[in-house]
C-alpha cells in the first residue's frame, strides 16, 4: 500500500489488455479510498467492480485483502491473500506481492504459524497434544498438582512457619516448614506438595515420625489413625535440595542468582504457575490460602533479606548465618511468598486515604537509592487511586512494599518485585511516559490476585485481565480517555486468540501462555463496560467485587453472577463467547445504496442468543454513531451518507465514541 505509483504502473498493462478506461478508473478510485479517504467499504466496492473486468489481477486481491483487514473481515482477507498467491504465481516477479504483505497475515490466516509461535515462546521443549487443543499431554503428575483431590480437600491450612537456609556456594537450600491445619473431613492421609528434586529428611507429628509416599511432586502423608473432623493439627517437614535456576523469570520461574554492581549477592525467587512447592513444602493449590504466615530466611553474612509482611527480627547464629524473620498477618496465596537477599537500603513512604495513614516501604540497591526516592513517588499515587477504585488497601496493617528485584516484576504480596530499570528501559513504557507500567500493573494485583484469588490457574484471567484493565483505568483517570484508548488499542494488537482464555481445570494450566489473559482480558472488560454503558454501574462492580470477596478464592462464575446481580441482566452469553472460545463475535452487515443515503442492516453472528454488544460506525467522516447490536437483524437509514465505515481494532480509531469502540470481527452478508 505504500508505493501506489509503482503498483499503478505494473497494473496498467493488465488493465490495458482489458481495454477498459472504466476499469482503470476503479483502480485509481480504490487507491484513493484506501490511502487518503480511509473508506474501506468503498475500496472493496471499487475493487469488486475492477475484478469484474479482469479476475486475475493479484494487486487487486491484495489491496482488497488490506481493506477487509481494516474492516475486521479476516475470513474475507485470508481468502483474498490466498488468491493473491495463486494469481501472482503467473507473474514474472513471482510472489512479489505476498512478500509485501503485513506480518499479521500469518497471525490470522495460518494456524500452523501461530502454533509454532506459541510452541517457541510459551511451551518450548514441551510436546503439545493436537487432540486437546494443542495443550501439553496432561498426566497424573498434572492432576496431582492441579486438582483439589480428596487428600487435599480434607484439610484447610491456617498457618505456615517456614524456615529456609540459603547455601549460595552450592546454590542449594535446606529448610523446615511447620504446617498448621484444620481437618475438614476425617482422614488418615493428606497431600502436601514438594518437588521431587528435594530430599525429605523427616515428617513429624506430635513427636512421631510419619510414614509417607511420594508420587511425582506430591507427598501423601499417612497418620496412624483418623484425624477427626474439626480438629487442629500440625506437622513439620524437614527437607533439602537444589532449586531450579529460573530460565526466564518471572515467566519461567525458579531461583534467580545474581551479583549487584558492587559484586554483592543478589538473590530472589519467583514461582507463579511453576509452583511454590518448587522451593518449600505446602498445600500447593490456589484454593487454600493460609490465614497468616511467618517466613524466616537464613543467609551467610549481614546483607538484609526482605520478605512479605512486616519485619520482626534478625538473629545472629553461631555458624556465621543470620536468620531474618518476617510475619504476614493476612491470608496469602502460596506463589506470593518470596524473599529478596541483597545489599538493600530502605526508603519509607506513607499514603493518606480517607484520613487514615498507610505505611509503605521500598528497598533498593545503593546505586539506585537517590533515583528510587524520586522515581517511586508515583507508587503512592497508584496505591491511593486503587484504594478509591477497588476499596481500601486490603493489607493495611502490614503496609505496602516494593523491592528492587533481579527480575522484571512480580505481584508478591506486600513486597512487589520491581526490576524495570527506573525508566532507563523504555520498551515497557506507556505512550504517555509518565508512569511505570510495572508499578501500575503489579500494585493492582494487591486487590486482583492477592486479596481476591482465583481458585484454579484456569481462571487466572481474574488476576491478569483485571490488573491490566486497572492500568487503563489509572491512565484514564490521571491523563484522560485518549490515553486509555491508545493503550487499549496497543493491548488488543497483542492478542493471539489461539487458546481460549479459560480452558482446562484441575491440571495447573499454564494460562499465561500466549498472554491473552492479560490483553484479551482487558479487552473483555472494556467490551463489558461498553455494553453496560453506565460507568457508575460498571465501576461499582469493579469496586464492590473485591470488597465482597476480600481474602477469598473465587472463580469466573462468581464474577459473572455478580455482574448479573448488579445489572439485572444476563451476561453469560457475553462471557461464554470471549472466555471460552477463540473466535470473536462477528458483526454481520449488509447495506443498500438509496441515492445519497444508505440503508444499513446488522446483527451479531457466531454467538449465543442473548449476546449483545455495541459497535461504532462513522458516516461521511463527520459523524460517529453507536449501534446497540443484538443477534436479531436491525436496520437503520443513514441519511445523506454517501459513505460509511466501521470502527474496528485494525482501522483508524480517531473519532470513535467512548463506550462503543469494541473488539470484534466483521463479515459482509452475501447478496
Image (spheres, grey):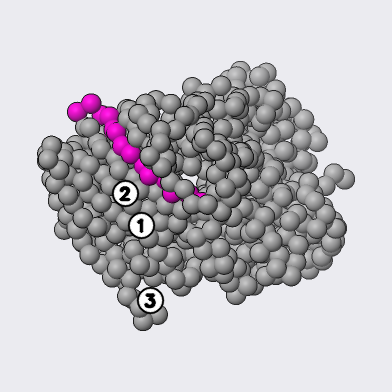
Residue at the spot x=60%, y=19% of the render? 94
Residue at the spot x=77%, y=56% of the render? 611
Residue 145, position in %: x, y? 54, 34
Observer-nearest of 378 and 657: 378
Observer-nearest of 178 and 51: 178
Label pair 1/2, CB-CB below 8 angstroms? yes
* Earlier-in-chain disc, 2 versus 3: 2
* Earlier-in-chain disc, 3 versus 1: 1
Write down the region rendered in magenta.
169-182
* Earlier-in-chain disc, 1 versus 2: 2
Which image quarter holds the C terminus? top right
Label pair 3/1, CB-CB below 8 angstroms? no
Q: Which residue is mark 3?
A: 353
- The circle on residue 328 is 1
- The circle on residue 295 is 2
Residue at the spot x=41%, y=60% of the render? 330
Residue farthest toward the bottom in the current orientation of the protein: 355
Q: At numbered mark 2, what does the secondary structure look like: helix, strand or loop?
A: strand
The correct choice, above or below, for 449 with respect to 382 in the image is above
Compute the Cα span from label 1 to label 2: 8 Å
Amino acid at each position: 500500500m505504500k508505493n501506489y505509483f509503482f503498483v499503478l504502473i505494473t497494473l496498467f498493462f493488465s488493465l490495458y489488455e482489458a481495454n477498459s478506461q472504466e476499469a482503470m478508473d476503479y483502480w485509481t478510485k480504490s487507491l484513493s479510498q484506501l490511502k487518503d479517504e480511509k473508506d474501506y467499504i468503498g475500496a472493496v466496492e471499487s475493487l469488486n467492480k475492477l475484478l469484474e473486468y479482469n479476475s486475475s489481477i493479484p494487486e487487486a486481491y491484495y489491496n482488497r485483502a488490506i481493506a477487509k483487514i481494516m474492516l475486521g473481515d479476516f475470513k474475507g482477507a485470508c481468502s483474498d491473500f490466498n488468491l493473491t498467491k495463486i494469481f501472482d504465481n503467473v507473474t514474472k516477479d513471482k510472489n512479489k506481492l505476498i512478500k509485501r504483505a503485513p506480518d499479521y497475515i500469518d497471525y490470522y490466516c495460518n494456524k500452523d504459524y501461530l502454533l509454532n509461535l506459541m510452541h517457541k515462546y510459551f511451551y518450548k521443549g514441551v510436546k503439545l497434544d493436537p487432540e486437546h487443543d494443542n495443550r501439553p499431554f496432561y498426566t497424573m503428575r498434572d492432576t496431582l498438582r492441579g486438582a483439589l483431590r480428596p487428600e487435599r480437600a480434607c484439610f484447610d491450612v491456617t498457618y505456615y512457619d517456614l524456615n529456609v537456609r540459603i547455601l549460595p556456594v552450592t546454590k542449594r537450600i535446606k529448610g523446615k516448614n511447620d504446617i498448621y491445619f484444620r481437618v475438614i473431613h476425617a482422614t488418615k492421609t493428606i497431600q502436601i506438595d514438594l518437588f521431587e528434586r528435594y530430599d525429605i529428611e523427616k515428617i513429624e507429628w506430635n513427636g512421631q515420625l510419619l510414614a509417607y509416599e511420594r508420587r511425582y511432586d506430591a507427598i501423601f502423608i499417612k497418620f496412624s489413625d483418623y484425624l477427626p473432623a474439626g480438629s487442629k493439627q500440625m506437622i513439620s517437614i524437614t527437607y533439602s535440595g537444589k532449586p531450579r535456576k529460573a530460565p526466564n523469570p518471572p515467566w519461567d520461574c525458579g531461583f534467580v542468582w545474581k551479583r549487584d554492581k558492587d559484586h554483592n549477592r543478589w538473590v530472589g525467587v519467583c514461582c507463579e504457575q511453576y509452583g511454590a512447592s518448587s522451593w518449600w513444602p505446602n498445600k500447593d493449590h490456589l484454593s487454600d490460602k493460609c490465614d497468616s504466615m511467618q517466613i524466616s530466611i537464613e543467609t551467610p553474612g549481614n546483607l538484609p533479606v526482605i520478605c512479605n509482611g512486616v519485619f520482626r527480627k534478625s538473629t545472629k547464629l553461631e555458624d556465621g548465618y543470620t536468620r531474618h524473620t518476617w510475619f504476614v498477618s493476612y491470608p496469602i496465596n502460596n506463589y506470593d511468598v518470596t524473599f529478596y537477599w541483597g545489599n538493600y537500603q530502605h526508603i519509607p513512604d506513607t499514603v493518606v486515604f480517607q484520613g487514615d495513614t498507610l505505611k509503605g516501604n521500598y528497598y533498593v540497591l545503593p546505586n539506585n537509592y537517590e533515583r528510587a526516592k524520586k522515581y517511586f513517588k508515583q507508587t503512592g499515587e497508584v496505591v491511593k487511586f486503587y484504594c478509591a477504585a477497588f476499596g481500601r488497601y486490603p493489607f493495611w496493617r502490614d503496609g505496602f512494599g516494593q523491592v528492587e528485584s533481579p527480575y522484571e516484576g512480580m505481584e508478591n504480596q506486600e513486597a512487589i518485585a520491581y526490576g524495570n530499570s527506573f525508566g532507563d528501559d523504555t520498551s515497557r513504557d506507556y505512550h504517555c511516559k509518565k508512569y511505570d507500567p510495572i508499578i501500575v500493573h503489579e500494585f493492582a494485583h494487591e486487590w486482583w490476585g492477592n486479596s481476591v484469588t482465583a481458585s484454579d490457574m484456569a481462571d487466572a484471567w481474574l488476576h491478569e485481565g483485571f490488573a491490566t484493565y486497572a492500568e487503563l483505568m489509572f491512565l484514564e483517570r490521571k491523563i484522560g480517555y485518549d490515553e486509555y484508548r491508545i493503550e487499549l488499542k496497543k493491548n488488543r494488537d497483542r492478542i493471539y486468540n489461539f487458546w481460549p482464555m479459560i480452558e482446562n481445570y484441575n491440571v495447573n494450566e499454564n494460562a499465561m501462555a500466549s498472554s491473552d489473559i492479560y490483553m484479551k482480558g482487558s479487552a473483555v472488560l472494556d467490551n463489558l463496560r461498553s455494553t453496560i454503558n453506565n460507568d457508575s454501574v460498571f465501576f461499582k462492580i469493579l469496586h464492590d467485587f473485591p470488597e465482597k470477596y476480600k481474602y477469598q478464592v473465587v472463580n469466573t462464575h462468581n464474577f459473572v453472577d455478580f455482574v448479573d446481580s448488579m445489572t439485572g441482566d444476563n451476561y453469560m452469553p457475553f462471557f461464554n463467547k470471549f472466555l471460552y472460545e477463540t473466535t470473536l463475535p462477528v458483526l454481520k452487515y449488509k447495506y443498500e445504496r438509496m441515492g445519497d443515503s444508505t440503508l444499513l442492516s446488522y446483527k451479531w453472528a457466531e454467538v449465543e442468543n442473548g449476546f449483545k454488544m455495541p459497535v461504532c460506525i462513522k458516516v461521511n467522516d463527520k459523524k460517529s454513531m453507536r449501534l446497540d447490536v443484538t443477534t436479531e437483524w436491525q436496520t437503520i437509514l443513514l441519511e445523506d451518507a454517501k459513505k460509511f465505515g466501521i470502527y474496528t481494532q485494525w482501522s483508524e480509531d480517531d473519532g470513535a465514541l467512548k463506550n462503543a469502540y469494541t473488539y470484534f470481527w466483521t463479515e459482509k452478508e452475501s447478496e
